[in-house]
Image (spheres, grey):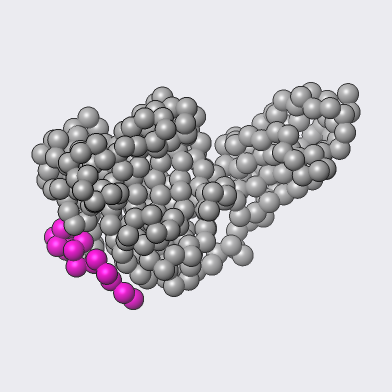
Amino acid sequence: MKHILLLALMVTAGAVNAQLYFEDFDSYAVGDYISIEGAPAWAVWTAGNEGGDMDAQITDEAALSGNQSLKIFGNLAGGPMDVILVAGIEGAYEVTFNMLVPAGNSGYYNVQENQIPATAWAFDCFLNGDGSMVYSIDQQEVAYASYTPGEWLKLTHLIDTDSDLMHLYLNDEYVTQLPYDGGQIGGVNFYAFGDGTNLPTYYVDDVLVDLTDPVVDNVKLTTPIDCTFGPNPAQEFVRIQANLDNALVRILGLDGKVVLQERRNDLVSGSEFNLDLDNGIYLLEVTNGINRMTQRLVIQK
C-alpha cells in the first residue's frame, strides 16, 4: 500500500485516532480561500489561481455540523470555481463527504485517478436539479440514483486501487458497485458544474478520508431485476413495476435507437409511462447500471 500525500493529510487533519483526514471547515474564518488556508490537502485546478475566482471560500450560509461549510458555485457553462481535495493514495480507502444542493440548483463532482489534475478521470457524478443523479465513466452513463434537493446528502465511496472496484453508498445505503481502473485515488474535484439547466451551486461539509477493508466484487450477489409491465400490446401508456426504485427505463426501436428514456425512482410501487409511439415492435429496457432487463413491447392502436 502506497501513501503519496498521506503525511500531508495527517498533518492537516491532526491525525486523530485512525482517521487519516477529516475536515468540517469550522476552524477557518468565513471568507477564507480553501486552497490557501487548507493547503496542501486542498488546491485549485490550475496552480496560480489561489485566492481568485477558481478558488472556493468558507461560508456560514449552510452547514451539516458546526456552523460552516465549503461553497461551490458558478455559471451554467461550468466554472470558474474548481477545487480539489488532493489525495494521491493507493490501496483501499473510504472517501466520504456531504453535499447540499439547494432546490433550483444542480451540482457535480468527479474523482481523479492521479494527484496531478486532468491526468485521468475515474468517474463523474451529476446531481441534477430534478433530484436525479447520474454516474458516468468515460462519458458513458453507468449508474443512477436520486437525492432530495435542499437536504444534505452523505456520499460514501469505498475505493480499492488493487481490486479496481468501488462501492457507492448514499446516506449509508448501498447503491451500486462500479469499476475503478485508476492506479491512484488522485483526489476529489469539486467543480462548479451541473445539469446545464439549473445553476451549479452546492455546499460541501464533513469530508473524511480513511483506511477501509479491501473492496471485493459483489456483483454476483446483486439481486437480478424482476420486472413486470402491461398492457402489452399497449396503446397510450404502459405500467411498469420492478424490484428496485432507482433505474433507467428506455424504449428502443428494433434498430437500437432510443425513442423514450426516463430515470425513475418509483418502480417498486409501480409507475405509468405515457407512450407517443407509432404502431410496431419495440424493446423495453430497465437497468440500474449493473443489471439489465429487456423485453419486447408491442404498440397497437
Whole-percent x, y for residue 100 in the image: 34, 36
Q: Height in image: 237 above or below 218?
A: above
On whether residue 135 falls in the magenta region, the answer is no
Q: Height in image: 261 above or below 124?
A: above
> Can residue 152 be seen in this snapshot?
no
> In the rendered image, which quarter contains the C terminus?
top right
Whole-percent x, y for residue 116 in the image: 32, 60
The residue most toward the bottom is 1
Residue occupying the point 81% across, 43% down: 255
Residue occupying the point 22% across, 44% down: 49
Whole-percent x, y for residue 254 in the image: 83, 43
- Compared across the picture, whether 14 is left or right of 239 comes to left
> In the rendered image, which quarter contains the N terminus?
bottom left
Q: Which residues are magenta?
A: 1-16
Which residue is more in the foreground, 6 or 50? 50
Residue occupying the point 17% across, 54% down: 39
